[in-house]
Image (cartoon, rainbow, N blue to C red):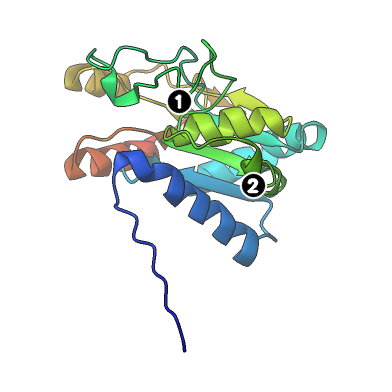
Amino acid sequence: MAICCCCVVVDKYLNLHFKSYGGFVWQQRHCAIAKWMLKMDDDTVIHLPRMAHWIENKFRHIATKHPLLFVGVGGHRTPVRDPNGPYKKWYVSREMYAPEIYPPFVVGGGYMATTETVKAILAQTHKINVLYLEDVMYTGILGELANATVLDQKQDHFWFPYQSEHEVRQFWHSKTLKCVDGVPTLFAVFAAQNRAEIVQNFEELKKMSCK
């Protein structure tokens, strides 16, 4: 007699760690030959040619010294303890996570990791209890167990806009965008609020020029 078992996981914020785990396992099974993995949310825009340039000209060299490496935007390391406060989306009780500080981690909106890093953190998953904050769990807690390096690049390559729409427009039209050797450094923009903003962010990334 054949028995079919199906596990249904509801697609919601509290279950994001399942999706990330599935992505990591898929990468290791089907694309382990790749040297880098990019994880991003659907409201994040990436300029892929520019990202490839900076992998080749910057991060590849860093990875020779730190082969277990996460690259992204460093996250806020103090757990949210107020279940009714303005940041309750990220509430974590002491039963879920007892320490009063998270290990260094990168936020889940978008980050890169070497394929060796993915393999290393998956090898540590049996050692911890699940934490629904998937970025803290994978890049922070498991990353620490795997002795991975966390590289915060929010000042150069990643932008997480907390500003108002007016301030976002000002940013895109400013002349302060950073260039190195004639190439813009910014290649990732997080947290678009709607389809129009996704399109705008991508078009602005494409238009960036160091001339």
Q: Residue shown at 58%/46% (left/top)?
A: 52
Name above or below for residue 31 compared with residue 126. Answer: below
Residue at horizontal 29 percent and vertical 19 percent from the top: 162
Label 1: state its secondary structure. loop
Within-10-Å neighbours for mark 1: few <14, some 14–19, many 20+: few
Question: Image quadrant of residue 160?
Answer: top left
Kind of element beneath mark 2: helix
Residue 36 falls left or right of residue 45: right
Horizontally, residue 78 falls left or right of residue 52, namely left
Percent position (x, y) of residue 127? 65, 37
- As displayed, is residue 57 above or below residue 76? below
What kind of residue is marked 2?
Leu
Residue 130 visible at all: yes
Q: Tag 2: Cα neighbours inside 10 Å, few (<14), some, or many (≥20)?
A: some
Disc nearer the start of the sequence (1/2): 1
The residue sitting at 33% across, 42% down in the picture is 202
Front residue of this view, candidates 45 and 146: 146
On residue 122, which mark appears? 2
Residue 67 in percent (x, y) is at 76, 38
Q: Which mark is residue 205?
A: none
Can residue 183 be seen in the rendering of this structure? no
Q: Residue at x 45, y 17 (%)?
A: 94
Q: Quadrant of residue 175?
A: top left
For mark 1, what is the residue? Answer: 96
